[in-house]
Image: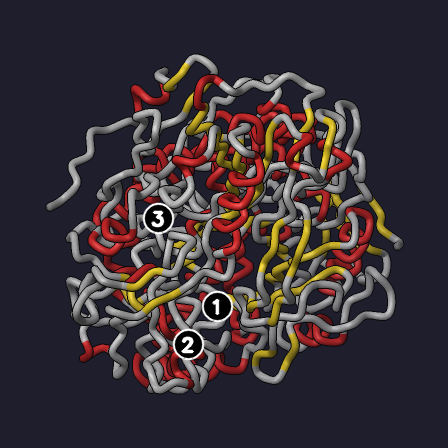
Amino acid sequence: MPIKYVKNDGGPTLGYSSKSGVQILYVDGKAFKDLNKDGKLDKYEDWRLSAEERAKDLASKMSVAQIAGLMLYSRHQSIPAGQGPFLGTYGGNPFFESAANLSDLSDQQKEFLTNDDLRHVLITTVESPEVAAQWNNNAQELVEGIGLGIPINTSSDPRHASVASTEYNAGAGGKISMWPETLGLAATFDPEVTEEFGKIASKEYRALGITTALSPQIDIATDPRWSRFNGTFGEDPILSADLAKAYVDGFQTTEDTTDGWGEESVNAMVKHWPGGGSGEGGRDAHWGYGKFAVYPGNNFADHLLPFTEGAFKLAGKTGKASAVMPYYTISVDQDDLNGENVGNSYNKYLISDLLRDKYGYDGVVCTDWLITGDEPDAVDIFAGKPWGVEHLTVAERHYKALMAGVDQFGGNNEAAPIIEAYEMGVKEHGEEFMRKRFETSAVRLLLNIFRLGLFENPYVEERANTVGNPEFMEKGYDAQLKSIVMVKNKNQLLPLVKGKTVYIPKRYLAAGKNWFGIEIPEKYEYPFNLDVVKKYFSVTDKPDEADFALVGISSPEGEGFSREDVENGGTGYVPISLQYGTYTAKYAREESIAGDVRDVLDRTYKGKSFTPRNTTDLELVQKTKEEMKGKPVIVSLLLSKPTIVEEFESSIDALLLNFGVQDQALLDILTGVTEPSGLLPMQLPANMKTVEEQYEDVPHDMVCHVDTEGNEYDFAFGLNWRGVIQDDRTKKYKKIHKVKN
């Protein structure tokens, strides 16, 4: 690609494409990009001015259509197009389209960049750092030559998850550094680890051309059944606030700059305001059956703390997270102004009065994806999510969100509904009012592009030596080790001596559907990479020959809705079980807490039964216990949310919990290469009775499991080789909780 660079003494290096038509202007001995090709230096082109002054100047020059395009945030895109999983269609368009070459833009991408003036793109999977960098350069070249030359702000959901079967080798690199899930970062109880992750991830993001992180997810997960629990920092508002602050500081701060912003900075879009962890019955609002966030414990205030005391009060110079995403949920009866029960992005009280006015947040507010699309015919179809405003047209939904204080629409590729919403505002408030309203959002959105230096140089080189370099891989692996929580170690069984013989039973999972409703075939496989295990132990498939057994399982699966129940004449609502065996909802509520006036369906499930797809995990542990005939059984449990271990805990000798780590990290703990130091970032409940009776909005309000060794699996509990961990972390975060009657 014909990218050229011009260095400025004491100023930024300019990057531009000779094919875009952009020329370099020289003023007072300094070089500037003539982005709008008018032959003169405009304020927004002058890098000597503040980002605020430049953003205001550019916003004033933009047409309504251009601002509408800036308000769009694309649907999910993969690089190369068509390589990621197919998740469905929206508005007749697939999530991904094919492209001829790996780094080429698809026709859909060219369409929304050129005709709809879209400048915010969400990237999912990438083929490699080299392909991602080249795709970024191709896309930036295209938009650099259009209109005002506004560069693309590319974003990503979290992409640093560990691949369990891979090995870590000191001095070796990888595709990208691997870390525990967000809940695993929380299990370290160490903000420094989380900030270090942010610093490393931001460098890797920028090498990929990614400049906004759609993270961290700082909802406090106060309902243990919530399917997005593992994407949070757990249930505690204080720990979540501290880690949110560290995460955002790590991503946004470039060292040795005046305001903290620079070429290593990545915008952090924290989610989900005002908190989505209190879904009724633990159900998630991606689906129509989970629309409502409820507050039976009157504890709305705690859900704001990770935002107001964390992401909005940074220790670093950038001050606050540059963007925030409201959740899909209807925060039931929390509108103190109008008493409206509508999705959070449509609620003026939650966005303007509370977020903007009371807490002074002036960054970008971007809706969650696809909230303006039409509601599907069935509540379990993954499509539009206009909760509370289903009766409005698509354009009316855009208008209502804009008037509530939203700046941007996630998952929307088309500008037409926003332009139509603008015309609605002109009729109601006049041209001057709506122009000012649009420019206000445009300035916020442009600031997040200017501050990263993209107007000067949006291009990235193929920096494979940055993404997944050995130093970053080592830091990620160390965090994985720190995230593993040991909760049981009967008779000090662990650590084990290397070279012993281990029996690892295969794990069976029945066929089912994934989170997006796509069919999953049945699986019968080893839970660990045996080649990795063999570097620590001898492996046998005969229990009689083994010194011990190692069983790998995961948290029970369930979403709280059953199509089979609907087909049998029911409402579809079933319990979300945290136990492995069949659960019958004896202790569930008699009626929906959100009230039938807000929904035509009765969402109660009392008396109904549910069996998790992986009920076989319990059978696997029990069978292994029998086969081992008294010899030690160790269980490794991959936790995605609080899990009831009462069904099997008394029959095993050791229990290790992880939140997404490489097998090698687990084996290093088992053999004493590293001492366990992780702590539970949530409670593990004693039974489903306490789960049903806890309040969706209140943390730490369950009766916890007590094991055969007398240890209570409460928040901030964990073991090391000497016993129960008691250190500065537990002293700071461990609290005395009173379970309600």
C-alpha span from label 3 to label 2: 29 Å
Q: Position of residue 379 (x, y in %)?
A: 41, 78
Q: SS at mark 1?
A: strand
- Residue on which disc 3 sits: 221
Of the image marks 3 and 2, the number of the one nearer the N terminus: 3
Disc 2 packing (10 Å; few <14; some 14–19; many ≥20): many
Q: Earlier in the sequence, mark 3 or mark 1?
A: 3
Residue at x 35% of width, y 82% of height: 390
Q: Secondary structure at mark 2?
A: helix
Q: Which residue is mark 2?
A: 398
Residue at image position (67%, 64%) is 77
Q: Between marks 3 and 1, how big is the CA–CA gap?
A: 25 Å
Identify which residue is drawn at 46% across, 37% down: 318
Residue 370: tell me if it is visible: yes
Apparent side of residue 701 relative to residue 193 in the rendered image (left or right):
left
Does 555 sit left or right of 40 as displayed? left
Q: Of the residues shown, which amino acid type is indicated by label 2?
A: His
Identified by mark 1, the residue type is Phe
- Where is mark 1, residue-wise? 409
Q: CA distance from mark 1 to mark 2?
A: 8 Å
**Label 1–label 2 contact, CB within 8 A:** yes
- Near-viewer residue (211 or 622): 622
Circle nearer the N terminus (1, 2): 2
Q: Tell which tag, 3 or 2, sits nearer the viewer.
A: 3
Residue 86 falls in which quadrant of the image?
bottom right
From this view, report whether residue 79 is shown above or below residue 95.
above
